[in-house]
Image (spheres, rainbow, N blue to C red):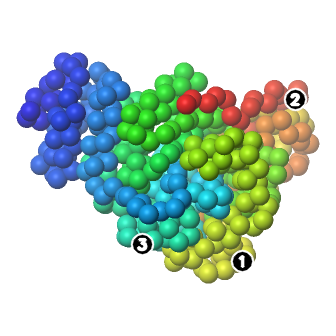
Amino acid sequence: MLPQEIIKAKRDGQALAAADIASFMTALADGSLSEGQAAAFAMAVWFNGMDRDETVALTLAMRDSGDVMAWPDLDRPVADKHSTGGVGDNVSLMLAPIVAACGAAVPMISGRGLGHTGGTLDKLESIPGYDILPSAARFQAIVREVGCAIIGQTGEIAPADKRLYAIRDVTATVDSVPLITASILSKKLSAGLGSLIMDVKVGNGAFMQTIDEARTLARSIVDVAGGAGVRTSALITDMNQPLADCAGNALEVASAMEFLDGGKAGTRLERIVMTFAAHMLVNSGICASLADAEVLAHEARASGAALDLFGRMVRALGGPSDFSTNWKKHLPVAPVVRPILAEQDGHIAAYTTREVGLAVIALGGGRLHPDDAIDHRSGFDAILPIGTKVARGEPIAFVHAADEASAERCARRYVSTVTISEEAPPVSPVILETVS
Ligand code: URA
């Protein structure tokens, strides 16, 4: 079918054949399709949706528009995780080495910050020398040798998605469940995964604001990935407060290193990391039960194996050779660090979490435009979880800034994101639902 006929069929609400979706994606990737045609296609999908078979076909066509990795002779299962994005969500930095230390191979293709959310790649670029775009051959060699590698989407990975995503971004067609599903999965599945776990975040710091929206996306991703032959489950998790006790690139790497060194015990972050690790180990067949898998994941941290593995990944990707032991020496530090003080007695009752992410961007820790350089040093740390009792004048966080003026401005902004109440608030669970 001609591209305009394919657009017309979707505009008129018809289901598209897999062959037509594939030819449209080939033309998108090789540049023979115009930007207008791609935008019209995206808008037709936005209005009329796609059923499961169409979304599977779109996912596979976008995946196959670029390189698809294979792992012949690898003696370990290949597993990965993806998050829809949040604030203080540094889970991948700990999860990949823990699961790799337990026997899986984790070839993780991650993204940059999107909107108010942080991006794993921006965090990793806080590490001097870390190469987020190695060749596919080097990426695969590191995964084989070390066990995990976290890198970005190169031009060879799902180029049809790369082009369509850029067009969706400027044509109000990002928020379509089939387009989001295919976009996320096309990149993830190009790494040749055997299994995948999705973290679908919901709440005032997530893209999905309601549990129904989160369920719809989780169901779509699980069904479509299954249709594409990859065993996938999704956990819907709470994003009504920053997940880690910090938000900002180098600060989140520091938090991950402390975690891998045995810190952050008993936190919501620990619950998420260990639960996701357990699901990955069960989905990939390494463990028979979630309980056994969690024990194994805890051992990988307690023994130092996961920390050591993170250090070897950093070294293999061009970072400092002593990062796992000397990370404090290597991470950049902001020149101005100031406490942010509670303005009343009470309990931390709520965050407007999206605003915390936007305050990090205002400090320079995220981008307003795609080409902006970012200040990896800036952000907030010592963030208190909801439910913490505080007294007036006590620190509720610290701001890390490039100068006094932005520290002052963003500290005030941070204060406006926090509600302190007299009564202790109910504390919601961090893991809300499992979709499998
Ligand atoms: N992340 C992606 O990779 N694609 C989308 O469409 C949305 C979020």
Mark drawn on residue 424: 2
Label 1, label 2: how far apart the Cα atoms are:
39 Å
What residue is drawn where x is 50% and y is 68%?
Answer: 144
Mark 2 surroundings: few (<14), some (14-19) or many (≥20) residues within 10 A? some
Label 3, label 2: how far apart the Cα atoms are:
52 Å
What residue is drawn where x is 32% and y is 48%?
Answer: 63
Q: Name the residue nearer the viewer: 274 or 287.
A: 287
Label 3, ligand 1: CB separation under 8 Å: no
Give the x, y percent position of residue 341: 82, 49
SS at badge 1? helix
Mark 1 surroundings: few (<14), some (14-19) or many (≥20) residues within 10 A? few
Q: Name the residue nearer the viewer: 217 or 333.
A: 217
* Quadrant showing the N terminus: top left
Q: In this view, does 354 lie to the left or right of 424?
A: left
In front: mark 3 or mark 2? 3
Q: Name the residue nearer the viewer: 324 or 366.
A: 324
In front: mark 1 or mark 2? 1
Label 3, label 1: how far apart the Cα atoms are:
25 Å
Report which residue position mark 3 lands on.
138
Q: Is residue 363 left or right of residue 182?
A: right
Report which residue position mark 1 lands on.
326
Determine contact: label 3, label 1, CB under 8 Å. no
Residue 19 falls in image quadrant: top left
